[in-house]
Image (cartoon, rainbow, N blue to C red):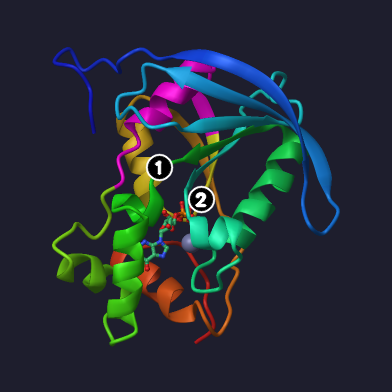
Amino acid sequence: MTVDSSGALPAASVRTQVSVPVRFSDGWSTTADVFTFTGLVDGKEHIALGLGDYREADVPLVRPHSECLTGDVFGSERCDCGPQLREAVERIAAVGGYLLYLRQEGRGIGLYAKLDAYALQDQGLDTYEANLALGRGEDERDYTAAAQMLAALGTSRVRLLTNNPDKSLQLGALGVEVAEQVPTGVHVSDSNVRYLRAKVEHTGHSLALPA
Ligand SMILES: Nc1nc2c(ncn2[C@@H]2O[C@H](COP(=O)(O)OP(=O)(O)OP(=O)(O)O)[C@@H](O)[C@H]2O)c(=O)[nH]1
Ligand SMILES: [Zn+2]
């Protein structure tokens, strides 16, 4: 986590706000206000989507979603990212809030390293062991930029849409008041069940999986 010596979050501000019509392949559609930022600590091009009546929401529903090119864009079934993203956009639009699309591919190790980790998983390592075998952390994500984005959007209190306790802990430590951690659905398949089980065992994700 990155805060200055006074413990304050470095200031960021909204750079651009632009309206984008969104339509998923199943036909469901909405309009999102897409926000870009200046001053984010890691210099990455994270975006926020304002969905539904986000301006009016008392405590907005917020999902910090880590980028997964294979799952979000190509529909890979090795993970649950694509269905979680689809679910999150609709649920947030229903009540008002933000989807933070964070450029933290591969839990922060990047796309090529994630694919290297997949190759190691095919030899028997689990998703966390594979990162370590590559000389990387199990999970290298830092949510300072996410906290900056929320501050820039004028949001200090959120309902956090996640099963990942580390997202709540880190954002809480960065000054975001997490009024509630709201679980996402469990999108389990034969292809991703090992990956989901490893999340429960290694990082305490709140996921009810079949025995
Ligand atoms: N290193 C690595 N990253 C993976 C693997 N499978 C998926 N990912 C990445 O894991 C991240 C998943 O992020 P999120 O969808 O925010 O999921 P999460 O941290 O489990 O938390 P919630 O979904 O909010 O409960 C994405 O960045 C994916 O690219 C893997 O096998 N190895
Ligand atoms: Zn994924």
> Magenta region: which residues?
141-158
Q: Residues within 10 Å of mark 1 (few under 14, many from 20)?
A: many
Q: Please determine whether, in this image, residue 30 is positioned above or below residue 153.
A: below
Mark 2 → mark 1, Cα distance in angstroms: 8 Å
Q: Do the residues labelled 2 and 1 touch (CB within 8 Å)?
A: yes
Task: Note whether residue 201 is visible.
Answer: no
**Tag count:** 2
Q: How crowded is mark 2: few (under 14 residues within 10 Å), some or many (20 or more)?
A: many
Q: Can residue 97 be seen in this view?
A: yes
> Which kind of residue does numbered mark 2 sit on?
Thr
Mark 2 near ligand 1 (CB under 8 Å)?
yes
In x, y percent, where is residue 25? 79, 57
Circle number at residue 168: 1
Percent x, y of residue 85: 61, 52
Left or right of 16: which side holds 137? left
Residue at the location (46% across, 33% down)? Answer: 46
Image spot of residue 27 (x, y percent): 86, 54
8 displayed left or right of 161: left
Residue 137 lies in the magenta stretch: no
Q: Mark 2 sits on what residue? A: 162
Is 151 a magenta residue? yes
Residue closest to the eye, 179 or 138 = 138
Residue at the image point whose x is 19% and y is 57% from the top: 137
Q: Residue furthest right?
A: 27
Tell me which label, 2 or 1, sits earlier in the chain.
2
User: Which corner quadrant of the image does residue 170 belong to?
Assistant: top left
The amino acid on which the numbered mark 1 sits, given as a three-letter code, is Ser
Q: Is residue 38 left or right of residue 10?
A: right
Quadrant where ligand 1 appears: bottom left
